[in-house]
Image (cartoon, grey):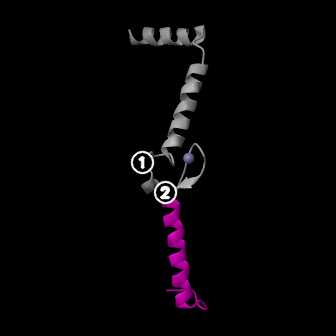
Amino acid sequence: MHPPGVPRCVQARTLRKNQRVVHDLMKKMHCPTCGHTFDPEKTPSMPFCSLRCRQVDLGRWLEETHAIPTDSEAAAEADAAEQEEQ
Ligand SMILES: [Zn+2]
């Protein structure tokens, strides 16, 4: 069942190593704020590595929302949506 010339013990070792790599990839996550890898099981602030990163992201999101001016184009879109509902 294994390629000739490769000792069985080496095969087993390689397989175990690959399984570990896959396991690590599944376990680790990238924080959207700071980009660091972290263990999702050790943070109460998923999907961020820490509470601080979550607040930073939330702050950024709020800033972007407030930065968008409510121009006539957006108002026109809202009117069109209301008309479609009727
Ligand atoms: Zn982070």
Under tag 1, what secondary structure?
A: loop
Under tag 2, what secondary structure?
A: loop
Spatial separation of the CA atoms under disc 2 and disc 1: 11 Å
Task: Identify whether 7 is placed above or below 67.
Answer: below
Task: Identify whether 20 is placed above or below 61.
Answer: below
x then y, percent, for residue 76: 54, 8
Q: Which residue is mark 1?
A: 44
* Label 2 vs 1, first from the N-terminus: 2
Residue at 57% from the left image edge and 12% from the top image edge = 70
Say few, some or many: other residues with alpha carbon within 10 Å of mark 2 (under 14 / 14 to 19 / 20 or more): some
Q: Which residue is mark 2?
A: 39
* Residue segment shown in magenta: 1-28
Check if residue 5 falls in the magenta segment. yes
Q: Amino acid at mark 2?
A: Asp
The C terminus lies in quadrant: top left
Residue at 61% from the left image edge and 20% from the top image edge = 67
Residue at 58% from the left image edge and 25% from the top image edge = 63
Say few, some or many: other residues with alpha carbon within 10 Å of mark 1 (under 14 / 14 to 19 / 20 or more): few
x then y, percent, for residue 44: 42, 48
Residue 6: name its quadrant: bottom right
Task: Identify whether 35 is placed above or below 24.
Answer: above
Q: Amino acid at mark 1?
A: Pro
Q: Which mark is residue 34?
A: none
